[in-house]
């Protein structure tokens, strides 16, 4: 089917900007003298990470890790695959993982476990959007932007079948009304 789904804004670009700025202030306080390594989980976190680091005025490094759990559509497969390894060593580093959204928690838990095994000096998690109602494994979020209801979200990096990442707002797809 090629028809465009109806999108409703959940978090507007202005609300996102305010949340990013608040998170950056919290991160600045904790990391300004630590030259942290920020690791974005691809692909969804690229926009959040790019906006976040523009607010951080102290030395830091950036890397990306590619993890995939979703097949087509809105359901997680439950199996996490490493699709792009890190470019840098995390050993002895102050590592801050940047994630777009936590849903079941499987991806983030896999990522934190993977990094912890590589012996960073510290490991924390910054998440823009949390959907706690579908959690399957516990995840401790150190810096959180928004808590969202159990809806499939798109925009600001989040995709459905690789589409809608470019939307500046975070939206949900409105259910078709049954008649
Ligand atoms: P989890 O492993 O179920 O916590 O899901 C984490 C990953 O699934 C995220 O990095 C996203 O790529 C994707 N994801 C989870 N919920 C959504 C959503 O509502 N919209 C788009 N992607 C999502």
Image: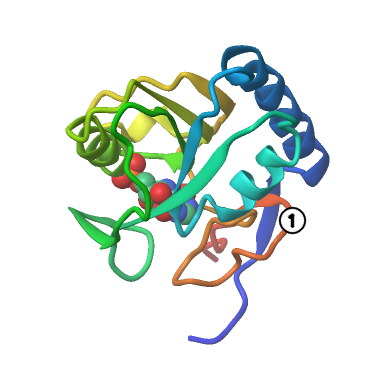
Q: Is residue 23 visible?
A: yes
Identify the colour scheme used.
Answer: rainbow
Mark 1 vs ligand 1: CB below 8 Å: no
For the residue pair 106 and 116, the one nearer the viewer reads as 116
- Image x and y of residue 115, in percent: 26, 36
- Residue 152 visible, this orientation: no
- Total numbered labels: 1
* Residue at the limit of the structure toward the bottom, as seen here: 2
Residue at image coords 70%, 33%: 20
Left or right position of 20 against 81? right
Residue to which mark 1 is pinned: 168
Q: Quadrant of residue 81?
A: bottom left
Residue, far right? 14
Judge by depth and name the residue closer to the eye, 118 or 22. 118
Q: What residue is drawn where x is 55% and y is 72%?
A: 163
As drawn, 86 above or below 121: below
Figure check: 138 above or below 105: above
**How crowded is the residue under tag 1: few (<14 C-alpha within 10 Å), some, or many (20+)?**
some
Quarter of the image holding residue 148? top right
Question: Going 49% across and 45% down the picture, which residue do you hit?
Answer: 151
The residue positioned 28% from the left and 67% from the top of the image is 71
Q: Position of residue 177 (x, y in %)?
A: 57, 61
Does residue 154 appear left or right of residue 122 in this picture? right
Measured as percent of width and height from the top left, residue 141 is found at 43, 22
Please state the horizontal and vertical placement of residue 92, each as a whole percent of the image: 32, 26
Looking at the rendering, in which quadrant would you find the C terminus? Answer: bottom right
Query: Regarding mark 1 in the picture, which secondary structure is present there?
Result: loop
33 horizontally vs 78: left or right: right
As drawn, 152 above or below 53: below
């Amino acid at each position: 089917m090629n028809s465009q789904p109806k999108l409703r804004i959940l978090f507007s670009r202005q609300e996102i900007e305010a949340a990013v700025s608040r998170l950056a202030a919290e991160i600045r306080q904790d990391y300004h003298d630590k030259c942290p390594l920020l690791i974005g989980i691809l692909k969804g976190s690229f926009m959040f990470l790019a906006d976040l680091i523009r607010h951080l005025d102290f030395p830091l490094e950036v890397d990306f890790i590619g993890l995939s759990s979703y097949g087509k559509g809105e359901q997680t497969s439950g199996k996490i695959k490493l699709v792009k390894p890190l470019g840098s060593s995390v050993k002895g580093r102050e590592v801050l993982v940047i994630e777009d959204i936590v849903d079941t928690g499987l991806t983030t838990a896999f990522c934190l476990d993977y990094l912890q095994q590589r012996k960073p000096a510290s490991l924390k998690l910054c998440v823009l959007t949390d959907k706690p109602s579908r959690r399957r494994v516990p995840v401790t979020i150190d810096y959180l932007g928004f808590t969202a209801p159990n809806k499939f979200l798109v925009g600001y990096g989040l995709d459905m079948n690789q589409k809608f990442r470019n939307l500046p707002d975070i939206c949900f797809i409105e259910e078709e009304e049954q008649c």
